[in-house]
Amino acid sequence: MVNAGLSFKSLNQKIEGGLFYNVQGPTLSIVGINNRPDIYTSPFNSLNLNLIYKLNDKSQISFTAKNILNNKKEMITDTYAIDSQVYSSYSPGQSFGIKWSYILF
């Protein structure tokens, strides 16, 4: 498992942000029984970005980007004498967001 991140804050503290990376190696998800193979979750590389711009003491704008690498989530079969096969696969896709927030009190 690898978790790494870079974060920063400007000297005037109006801008702050971070870039974060996470990956975990193959993980046993389903234990095979009899002639059924074990199912492993393949590594998923996640790269996310967060940026915040403070407009004033009560208001800020945030930008987020998730799964920047657009990686797929897959589960793979693994057993002796047989090549690995894809058990399931899906793409969660990338997501982007912008948020404005205001503190009332």
Image (cartoon, rainbow, N blue to C red):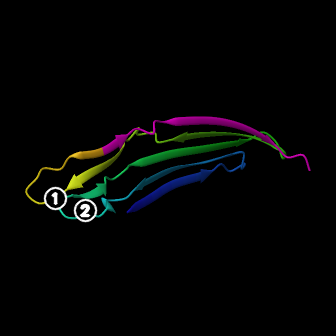
Residue most extreme to the right: 105
- Within 10 angstroms of label 1, few (less than 14), some, or many (20 or more) residues? some
Residue 71 location (% of width, % of height): 38, 41
Tell me if mark 2 has few (under 14), some (14-19) or many (20+) residues whose alpha carbon lies within 10 angstroms of its own: some
* Amino acid tagged 1: Thr
The x and y percentages for residue 7 are 56, 53
User: Residue 89's quadrant in the figure?
Assistant: top left
Range of magenta residues: 88-105
Left or right: 10 as drawn, with respect to 58 = left
Mark 2 sits on what residue?
32
Residue 35 among magenta residues:
no
Number of labels in the image equals 2
Can you say which quadrant of the picture contains the N terminus? bottom left
- Residue placed furthest toward the front: 34
Left/right placement of residue 74 relative to residue 48 reads left
Which residue corresponds to the image point at 71% horizontal and 50% vertical from the top-left?
13
Dot 1: what SS?
loop
Q: Are marks 2 and 1 in contact (CB under 8 Å)?
A: yes
Label 2's element? loop
Q: Which residue is mark 1?
A: 79
